[in-house]
Image (cartoon, grey):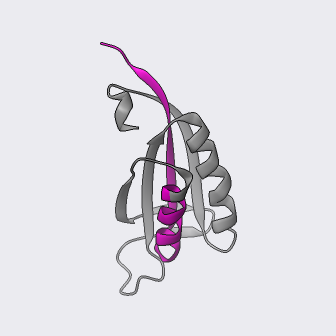
Amino acid sequence: MKLYRKKRIELVVESACAKAIIDMIDAAGAKGYTVVQDVAGKGNRGIRDAMHLTGLFRNTLIIVVAAEDIALRIVERSQTLLENYAGIVTLSDVEVVRDEHF
Protein backbone atom coordinates (compact mmCIF):
# COMPACT_ATOMS: atom_id res chain seq x y z
CA MET A 1 0.00 0.00 0.00
CA LYS A 2 1.35 3.40 -0.98
CA LEU A 3 1.06 6.34 1.42
CA TYR A 4 1.24 10.01 0.48
CA ARG A 5 2.69 12.76 2.67
CA LYS A 6 0.43 15.70 3.46
CA LYS A 7 0.03 18.36 6.16
CA ARG A 8 -2.76 18.45 8.73
CA ILE A 9 -3.85 21.84 9.99
CA GLU A 10 -6.01 22.10 13.10
CA LEU A 11 -7.57 25.43 13.93
CA VAL A 12 -9.46 25.91 17.19
CA VAL A 13 -11.18 29.25 16.76
CA GLU A 14 -13.94 31.29 18.30
CA SER A 15 -17.15 30.26 16.57
CA ALA A 16 -17.78 33.90 15.65
CA CYS A 17 -14.92 33.81 13.13
CA ALA A 18 -15.32 30.21 11.90
CA LYS A 19 -17.09 31.18 8.66
CA ALA A 20 -14.31 33.61 7.73
CA ILE A 21 -11.73 30.90 8.39
CA ILE A 22 -13.65 28.39 6.26
CA ASP A 23 -13.97 30.91 3.42
CA MET A 24 -10.21 31.50 3.60
CA ILE A 25 -9.51 27.73 3.54
CA ASP A 26 -11.61 27.40 0.36
CA ALA A 27 -9.85 30.39 -1.22
CA ALA A 28 -6.44 28.93 -0.31
CA GLY A 29 -7.18 25.88 -2.46
CA ALA A 30 -7.98 23.14 0.05
CA LYS A 31 -10.19 20.38 -1.34
CA GLY A 32 -12.11 19.99 1.91
CA TYR A 33 -12.23 20.33 5.68
CA THR A 34 -13.97 18.94 8.75
CA VAL A 35 -15.78 21.18 11.23
CA VAL A 36 -16.49 20.18 14.83
CA GLN A 37 -18.79 22.61 16.64
CA ASP A 38 -18.71 23.46 20.33
CA VAL A 39 -15.31 22.14 21.35
CA ALA A 40 -14.19 22.80 24.91
CA GLY A 41 -10.84 23.16 26.63
CA LYS A 42 -8.53 25.26 28.71
CA GLY A 43 -5.89 27.67 27.45
CA ASN A 44 -4.17 30.93 28.29
CA ARG A 45 -7.57 32.69 28.25
CA GLY A 46 -9.05 30.24 30.75
CA ILE A 47 -11.67 27.55 30.37
CA ARG A 48 -13.84 27.58 27.25
CA ASP A 49 -16.78 25.23 27.38
CA ALA A 50 -19.77 24.48 25.19
CA MET A 51 -22.32 24.88 27.97
CA HIS A 52 -22.77 28.66 27.74
CA LEU A 53 -26.27 29.73 26.80
CA THR A 54 -24.98 32.19 24.20
CA GLY A 55 -22.48 31.49 21.43
CA LEU A 56 -20.15 34.12 22.85
CA PHE A 57 -17.61 31.70 24.29
CA ARG A 58 -18.04 28.77 21.93
CA ASN A 59 -15.15 27.34 19.96
CA THR A 60 -15.04 25.48 16.67
CA LEU A 61 -12.39 22.98 15.54
CA ILE A 62 -11.57 23.00 11.83
CA ILE A 63 -9.36 20.24 10.44
CA VAL A 64 -7.76 20.39 7.01
CA VAL A 65 -5.48 17.89 5.27
CA ALA A 66 -3.69 19.37 2.26
CA ALA A 67 -0.51 19.55 0.25
CA GLU A 68 2.28 21.47 1.95
CA ASP A 69 2.00 24.63 -0.16
CA ILE A 70 -1.73 24.93 0.52
CA ALA A 71 -1.25 24.15 4.20
CA LEU A 72 1.39 26.85 4.63
CA ARG A 73 -0.89 29.33 2.85
CA ILE A 74 -3.72 28.48 5.27
CA VAL A 75 -1.48 28.86 8.33
CA GLU A 76 -0.16 32.22 7.12
CA ARG A 77 -3.56 33.64 6.19
CA SER A 78 -5.15 32.43 9.42
CA GLN A 79 -2.94 34.74 11.47
CA THR A 80 -4.50 37.89 10.03
CA LEU A 81 -8.03 36.56 10.57
CA LEU A 82 -7.27 35.64 14.19
CA GLU A 83 -5.73 38.97 15.23
CA ASN A 84 -8.84 39.90 17.23
CA TYR A 85 -10.00 36.40 18.22
CA ALA A 86 -8.77 33.57 20.39
CA GLY A 87 -7.36 30.80 18.25
CA ILE A 88 -4.86 27.97 18.12
CA VAL A 89 -3.35 26.78 14.85
CA THR A 90 -1.24 23.63 14.61
CA LEU A 91 0.49 22.03 11.64
CA SER A 92 1.64 18.42 11.55
CA ASP A 93 2.82 15.77 9.11
CA VAL A 94 0.39 13.03 8.11
CA GLU A 95 0.23 10.27 5.55
CA VAL A 96 -2.91 9.47 3.57
CA VAL A 97 -3.98 6.52 1.46
CA ARG A 98 -5.92 8.41 -1.22
CA ASP A 99 -3.73 11.20 -2.58
CA GLU A 100 -6.41 12.52 -4.96
CA HIS A 101 -8.70 13.44 -2.05
CA PHE A 102 -6.26 16.05 -0.75
For the point 62% across and 72% down, the residue is 85
**Which region is colored magenta?**
1-26
Front in this rendered view, residue 14 or 7: 7
Q: Can residue 82 be seen in this view?
A: no
Question: Is residue 64 shown above or below 98?
Answer: below
Task: Please indicate whether residue 23 sits to the left or right of residue 96 in the image.
Answer: right
Would you identify the image quadrant in which residue 91 lies? top right
Residue occupying the point 32% across, 28% down: 98
Farthest bottom residue? 54
- Residue 3 location (% of width, % of height): 38, 19
Is residue 66 rendered to the left or right of residue 79?
Answer: left
Q: Where is residue 5 in the image (x, y as percent from the top left)?
A: 48, 25
Residue 63, percent from left and from top:
43, 50
Q: Residue furthest top?
A: 1
Q: Quadrant of the C terminus?
A: top left
Image point (48%, 69%), residue name: 18
**In terms of depth relative to the viewer, which is nearer, 78 or 50?**
78
Residue lying farthest to the left in this orientation:
1
Q: Which of 48 and 12 is in front in this view?
A: 12
Q: In this view, does 98 lie to the left or right of 20?
A: left
Asked whether 64 or 48 is in front, the reply is 64
Question: Does 67 appear above or below 4?
Answer: below
> Could you tell me how many numbered marks the image carries?
0
Confirm whether the magenta stretch covers residue 4: yes
Regarding residue 65, the answer to whether it shows in the image is yes
* Residue at 29% over, 12% down: 1
Left or right of 73 in this view: 96: left
Instruction: Find residue 100 and report its image quarter.
Output: top left
